[in-house]
Image (cartoon, helix red, strand yellow):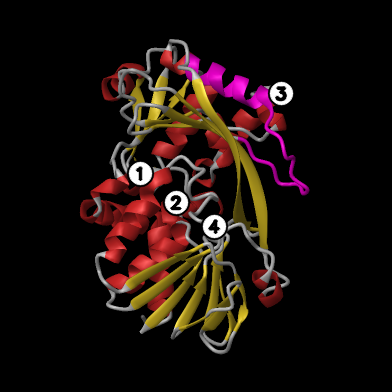
Amino acid sequence: MRVIVVGGGVVGTMHAWQAVQRGHEVVQIEREAEARGASLRNFGQIWVSGRAGGEELETALRARELWERIGAEVPGLGFRAIGSLTPVRNAREYAVAEAAAARPDAAARGYELVTAAEARAVNPALRGAFEAALWCERDAAVEPRTAQLHLREALRASGRYTFLPGREVRDLAGPGAVRDDHGDVHRGDAVVLATGAWLSGLVRELAPELPVRRVRLQMMQTAPLGEPLTTSVADADSFRYYPAYRSPALDELNAAQAQTPVAAAHKMQLLMVQRQDGGLTIGDTHEYEHPFAFDTLEDPYDHLAQVVESFLGRPLPKIRHRWAGVYAQCTDTTRVVHRQQVADGVWLVTGPGGRGMTCSPAIAETTANELGW
């Protein structure tokens, strides 16, 4: 079988990976010289802890298993089974963490409520003030800015993979065939459109009523911390954002403990991961209303810096990079992904939201199974 994958991000690349692993030939087409969207502008987190139960959790856990397996084959991914800690500072935040640790699926997620001393034993860099923490053993990380590069190197070694950058797919050229802006036609037994947040052009023509929206966020990266941050770190505002933490305790937190005005205005939470160079990737904000702003705002960065410094008990290293990014999210946020046949031999796979990096291996595996690869 010959598979055409349109889109060079992590979702597209994982579809290419699944096809090559199953013995097929793949041509992957990317409109930029390299993917530049959400696949690079994220934390690199394999984030199991906050996922809703049912299909979403099952997909995340399967993806976590696949990431570890692929990481063993492709060391350049920088796969690290680091887990995560969410420090809590008062009785209301503690109650939400306690309710999460009591979930029926807590063991599958690797949840454990730990004391501040136990949290610091796991992550000594957390010298700030907090009372306890929710530990999630199943969370992990990869290097987002280089993951696709190393995956493609491994795919090329198969002898059955071709990457074509700098080509925008403009239209269909028959069943299982697309034409790019160079006028070249690429024919296969199946075409997968994994174009991320690029939902215009051919995607709009094929799926004009697409149940997917775009979400914008801001993030930043620091100079090296100078010591290991041995886990990823979240704050209690993440309880408000992720569905796994919904409970009467969370309702009480929301009613009695408001977010700071800046965090509320920008729909913020703290997520933080250390990169292999020692720098910290820190975020994030959420903007849902179009048209998106074209500039980045300083108040959210100031808020994040204050939260991080309060957990570390020390000044934040110099901020070296600030950026914004956009990802595609199903308007029904309970759905893991939108997968739709849009033409003969052509499937659109989009809308995983902030789950793209986490869930992409399992999303691609499901596509491959459903299409009979």
Q: Which residue is mark 4?
A: 32
In the image, residue 264 above or below residue 290: above
Separation of marks 1 and 2 at Cα, in angstroms:
9 Å
Which element is circle 2 on? helix
Residue 32 or residue 195, whichever sits in front: 32
Question: Which numbered dot is residue 357?
Answer: 2
Which mark sits nearer the N-terminus, 1 or 4? 4
Q: Quadrant of the C terminus?
A: bottom left
Give the label on residue 261, or none.
3
Kindly check if marks 1 and 2 are in contact, taking CB atoms under 8 A apart as contact.
Answer: yes
Q: Reading the chain from its start, which is encountered first: label 2 or label 4?
A: 4
> Residue 162 appears in which quarter of the rendering?
bottom left
Q: What residue is shown at x 38% (from left), y 76% (from top)? A: 369
Classify residue 73 as left or right of residue 94.
Answer: left
Which mark is first along the chain, 1 or 3? 1
What's the residue type where badge 2 is placed? Answer: Met
